[in-house]
């Protein structure tokens, strides 16, 4: 039975493989000298090379068509961006979002969500939102702006989908996206905030333009290379001339740029160039030879320094890498146990071992706290979640889960406080407002329950149970007219509410 080793050292967790650091694998299994002469027979054209070329030509053409789509979509989206950037500098295009308009926006957002739910297709949301918005808006300036926003959204989406199909373009976009992590380009908000705040609008336009420009530039560069390759393969396919598949132009050897390579830490290129000159040129004058020798010697020294540094890094990092492999293995085992056997007791032991192995890693700590929760070890879970929220105060998820554990442990006020903090940070947990209302209602804190229900119903107006609970709270506060209206709303949504 063959054994497969995984030496990505934590980079990839591949099922069925044995994780091992690369240096340990080399020391244990790579002791025989490599006979390079055995590689020579392999350096020939594949027997089915012609067939492979025929198959790759349409795939390459498809890639070129996809790059054309990215270029075209990026260009159109960038043009829409420029249009929006120009408009927001004009006074009549500023402060377009009035209270009445914002109310209309929210109404259309809700309607679009409901329709998506009915169709079970949430990919339609933006299409429905923009189409209904353009029908409902009358003011020309606002309509013009929304139309540009729609064009930008549609073509940015097309460019992004095309980029996903091409890993090289996707990597370029990822590089641009990393720049957005800087504070200057951060601005998470919807179209309403975009129209209300000119600074947010400028940041988002700048951010979108950066990614589109990067996608367009990468696609144009790749398209040129792909087109040249396609032409070459098509010509070969017609002529079967093997010379077409071999490099015609030899790379020019240039020692004058050696220092620029050395400055970037690249010693390999000057080493190869200087070595080639000394070995192949039989008519070297003394000046050229001495220059090549000087560059060669410097490159050798830099290579030796790089090897020593690599060995030093390996020595320093190897203990951590070994721990990381064991850590990842423990995490994966705990996940599998949790999925299959629901044996949270065993999963908790594994996760505790992982956190003790690498206490600074977040995944094990989070998993350990969660496992303690599911194992009903609530006091211990509270301690671990408290540590997580202290160490990562900007993580809303930790606060929300901490609050839930506190609620389960009958620490109602503390739990609601933590959940409240999470909800202040993001609207991701607004669905839990109905449960907050129920908790207050059970505690006969009807005013607080009403606030929770009303906030919840602003986002989820079709929950008849929430309307009924609201009517009960209003009745308890002797607000009978309002209670009747809330109950009537519940019955409109579900006429069978009181039928058994």
Image (cartoon, rainbow, N blue to C red):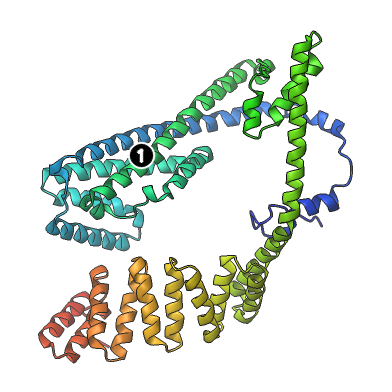
Specify whether 158 is left or right of 87.
right
Q: Which residue is drawn at 67% across and 66% down?
A: 327
Q: Can residue 376 be seen in this view?
A: no
Decide which of 487, 377 is in the foreground and name it.
377
Q: Is residue 490 left or right of residue 365?
A: left
Measuring from the top left, give residue 399's x and y in whole percent. 43, 73
Instruction: Point out the residue furthest to the right here.
Output: 32
Query: Would residue 210 appear left or right of 277 to someone viewing this image?
Result: left
Write down the residue under mark 1: 209
Name the secondary structure under disc 1.
Answer: helix
Q: In this view, does 380 lie above or below 273?
A: below
Quarter of the image that includes the N terminus: bottom right
Residue pictured at 59% horizontal, 65% vertical: 361
Query: Where is residue 280 shown, x and y percent of the image?
Result: 79, 15
Badge 1, how many Cα within 10 Å: few under 14, some, many 20+? many
Q: In which quarter of the image is the C terminus?
A: bottom left
**Measuring 65% from the left and 63% from the top, which residue is drawn there?**
328
Q: Is residue 25 left or right of residue 475?
A: right
Total numbered badges shown on the rendered structure = 1
Of residue 378 and residue 302, the one placed in the foreground of this image is 302
Residue 44 quadrant? top right
Looking at the image, can residue 402 be seen? yes
Q: In this view, does 321 lie above or below 355?
A: above
Place of residue 243 in the rendered image (x, y in percent of width and height, measured from the top left): 68, 16
- Front residue of 202/441: it is 202
**Above/below status of 198 relative to 332:** above
């Amino acid at each position: 039975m063959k054994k497969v080793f995984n030496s990505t050292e934590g980079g990839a967790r591949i099922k069925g493989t044995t994780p091992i650091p690369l240096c340990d694998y080399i020391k244990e299994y790579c002791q025989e000298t490599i006979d390079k002469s055995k590689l020579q027979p392999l350096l020939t054209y594949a027997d089915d090379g012609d067939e492979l070329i025929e198959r790759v030509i349409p795939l390459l053409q498809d890639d070129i068509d996809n790059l054309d789509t990215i270029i075209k979509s990026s260009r159109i989206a960038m043009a829409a961006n420029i249009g929006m950037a120009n408009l927001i500098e004009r006074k009549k295009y500023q402060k377009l979002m009035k209270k009445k308009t914002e109310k209309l926006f929210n109404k259309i957002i809700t309607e679009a969500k409901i329709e998506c739910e009915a169709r079970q297709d949430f990919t339609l949301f933006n299409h429905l939102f923009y189409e209904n918005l353009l029908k409902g808006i009358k003011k020309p300036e606002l309509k013009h702006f929304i139309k540009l926003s729609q064009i930008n959204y549609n073509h940015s989406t097309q460019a992004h989908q095309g980029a996903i199909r091409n890993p090289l373009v996707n990597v370029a976009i990822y590089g641009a996206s990393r720049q957005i992590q800087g504070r200057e380009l951060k601005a998470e908000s919807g179209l309403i905030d975009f129209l209300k705040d000119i600074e947010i609008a400028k940041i988002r336009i700048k951010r979108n333009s950066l990614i589109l420009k990067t996608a367009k530039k990468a696609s144009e560069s790749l398209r040129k290379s792909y087109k040249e390759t396609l032409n070459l393969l098509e010509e070969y396919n017609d002529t079967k001339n093997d010379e077409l598949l071999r490099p015609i132009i030899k790379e020019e050897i240039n020692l004058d740029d050696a220092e620029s390579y050395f400055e970037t830490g690249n010693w390999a290129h000057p080493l190869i160039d200087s070595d080639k000159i000394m070995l192949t040129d039989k008519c070297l004058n003394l000046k050229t030879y001495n220059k090549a020798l000087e560059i060669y010697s410097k490159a050798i020294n830099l290579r030796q320094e790089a090897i020593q540094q690599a060995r030093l890094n390996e020595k320093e990092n190897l203990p951590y890498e070994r721990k990381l492999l064991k850590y990842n293995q423990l995490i994966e085992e705990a996940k599998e146990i949790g999925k299959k056997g629901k044996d949270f007791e065993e999963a908790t032991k594994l996760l505790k071992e992982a956190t003790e192995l690498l206490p600074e890693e977040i995944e094990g700590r989070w998993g350990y706290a969660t496992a303690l929760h599911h194992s009903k070890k609530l006091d211990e879970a509270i301690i671990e979640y408290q540590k997580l929220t202290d160490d990562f105060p900007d993580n809303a998820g930790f606060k929300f889960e901490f609050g839930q554990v506190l609620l389960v442990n009958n620490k109602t006020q503390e739990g609601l406080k933590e959940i409240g903090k999470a909800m202040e940070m993001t609207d991701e947990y607004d669905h839990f407002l109905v449960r907050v209302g129920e908790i207050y209602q059970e505690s006969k804190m009807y005013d607080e329950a009403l606030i929770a229900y009303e906030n919840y119903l602003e986002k989820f107006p079709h929950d008849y149970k929430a309307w009924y609970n609201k009517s009960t709270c209003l009745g308890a506060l002797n607000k009978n007219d309002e209670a009747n209206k809330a109950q009537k709303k519940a019955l409109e949504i579900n006429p069978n509410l009181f039928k058994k």
